[in-house]
Amino acid sequence: MAKREIVQQLQKEVLSLQQSKKPVVGQPVNPDLGELLGAFPNKTFPTGAVHEFISPNPENAAATNGFLCGLLGQLMLQKGPCLWISARRTIFPPALKVFGIDPERIIFIDLDRPKQVLWTIEEGLKCEELSVVIGELSQLGFTESRRLQLAVEASNVTGFIHRYQPRGENTVACTTRWKIKPISSISGDMPGVGFPRWDIQLLKVRNGKPGSWQFEWKGGQFHSIAPQRFSIIKNERLKTG
Amino acid sequence: MSKRYVAIWFRHLMTDWMIRRRPELKDTAFVFAAPERGRMVVKSASADAQAKGIYPNMVVADCKAILPSLQVLNDIPGQDDILLNALAEWCIRYTPIVALDPPDGLMLDVSGCAHLWNGEQAYLRDMITRFSDFGYHVRTAMADTAGTAWAISRFGQVTPIIKPGRQLDALLPLPPAALRLEPGILERLNKLGLHTIGSFIRMPRTALRRRFGQILLQRLDQALGQEIEIIQPVRPIEPYQERLPCLEPIRTATGIGIALQQLLEKLCDRLGKEDKGLRRCIFRCYRIDGNIQQIDIGTNRPSRNVVHLFKLFENKIVQIEPDLGIELFILEAPVVEELTSAQDALWNAKTHGDNVAVAELLDRIAGKTGMHTIHRYLPNESYWPERSVKLAASLQEKPTTEWRIDMPRPVNLLPKPELIDVTVQMPDYPPMLFKYKGQLHNISKADGPERIEQEWWLRNGHYRDYYCVEDDNGARYWLFRLGPYTGNAPKWFIHGFFA
């Protein structure tokens, strides 16, 4: 027993060295993601990191926004407001209430040029009183992503970069890469459309195990709807780091 | 009390200014010229050049033919505006309301000012003397209306002071150009032999309007005082202003910091008493050599927090060049808003900290990209999707109604509904399939319709029947049909994407 504790302690230390992150003060925020948390180191959702979401079409973008809002609702419970920065925003504030967010607590910043978007995201990520910064843009280079990563390492703000129709899936310095697409909802015996369901692919996660899961948003919570499949995604080589 | 206006006309604005800078040009003929369509054209000519028959808009080559010794200087674009602004600011010594009258004049609202100079005669004389001491050739006139003052200053022959109510008599012998009309109208008047205002002022108004347009009547009315003409003062008077004169000139950043701190404390103290906070603030430093250095800041929410405001100014203090020293500091707040004394937390009580960092961040973003880029939304009591949110006016504004969650709303809403082709089995049924951007979607599940009526007190139009549908691939859409099935088939639109 003692040995295991020592090993766990050492693992934590190694992780903190690898991530070069300052220790989180107080209770870490851990969204209720069930089995998906197993993919992350320490079974903890990496807050204070930059996550990358890729959506190739408007349907996937809507699903990604839904998943993001679910996470956001839980991350915003403890800390301050959220910044939503984009050049072409389509989010409809009244829909956010369903995901447990008070839409008036989100500050939307609508800019014209991608350069301004990047600057604003970086400034936002440096501000410790924000809980989350969401940036919508299509192109993100490695250098820029590295800057964002350095900003969050100092401030411990969580960043979500939502890339809509990127030209290519280039390597970036983000902690994770996600792809979320909608799947058919199940409404049981009832007619009509059921609760939103998504196929969540975690293609890349630093020091973790990538995989794919299916989740449903019901009653203000994520529900895992299929047994965990650690099957390796055939076409895409898994990357870490 | 009746109004009085003074019009000042600088007859050789640019060239007089040049002579002030280069005294050797005095009593020589010189012009400012700029290239226009591949040739040099005179923009302004000195008094001596004009005496020899050289006027603006002539080609330089022609002028050289008239006067071979003519000196040609390059025109400085925008300089006349700067000069006129500086002169207008100087004229604030005569009256607080000074307006620009481009290209070469000023308009002063001098109601109730002249008696301080012992009467109108002495007032105008003082003005002319001072300007001619500077080297500016000016003509001034005083009248009850800005229009008449302008006319007399340019064309008056008899007296520069028009007694109250005597505008009509003064205008009668003047040419129509005194009414500030466009060249086209002047040409037409001239063609008809109407060489003085007196020759057409008594004609029926309808005839004048038909031939020369409304502008002529408007100018006449303005000159006679039958229509109010509003002049735009160069610098509105700032009520929230604090001054700090210094006994010894200040030259160090520390000194400027102390002065700023003192002024901010005074200003914020006053704002605190009036339950107000500032949104914009300008700090001006008057140097002993007459130069004015200034820095300004803006805030996202009204603030009277000395520490926060000082921090915003702090980075900009280095931009001030004290040079020989600063003798006067002025701090003013042009934009001031209500701020209740109980400064409640910005957001919910769940937050710790007072969100100063967030407000500061937003101030920085607004400074870089503009205030209009920052939005916050509040619920609005309307079912119509486009009107169901409204912009929050400030960062503290709280929602007055609840956000509705009883009906499904899409996460992504298209800025404008887009037309789609659909196949519908029966009226009032959801579509079986629809085509959007060339792609066919088979609908497997659908909810609806949710009928949303157009709000007739705001706009006319058909109602919308909204359907929430899911296609074979699991993607969820928000579609609507515009209006009922009568005659032509109604149009279908896609309006959003569900998560």
Image: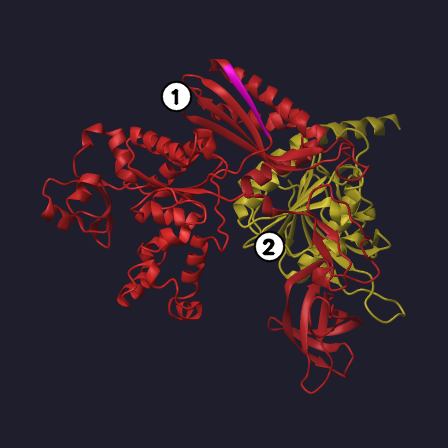
Chain colours: A yellow, B red
Question: Which quadrant of the rendered structure holds the N terminus of chain B?
Answer: top right
Secondary structure type for disc 1? loop
- Residue B271 in the image: state x and y as whole percent: 67, 30
In the picture of the structure, the residue carrying the numbered disc 2 is A88
Q: Which mark is residue B289?
A: 1
Q: Residues within 10 Å of mark 1 (few under 14, many from 20)?
A: few
Which numbered mark, 1 or 2, is in the foreground of this view? 1
- The residues colored magenta run B241-246
Dominant secondary structure of the residues highlighted in magenta in the image: strand
Mark 2 Cα-neighbour bin, 10 Å: few <14, some 14–19, many ≥20: few
Query: Which residue is at 40% across, 61% downward?
Result: B216
Judged left or right of residue B203, residue A101 is right
Residue A87: within the magenta? no
What percent of the width, then of the height, locates residue B381? 78, 58
The amino acid beneath tag 2 is: Arg
Cα separation between marks 1 and 2: 50 Å
Counting labels gives: 2
* Residue B277 visible in this rendered orientation of the protein: yes
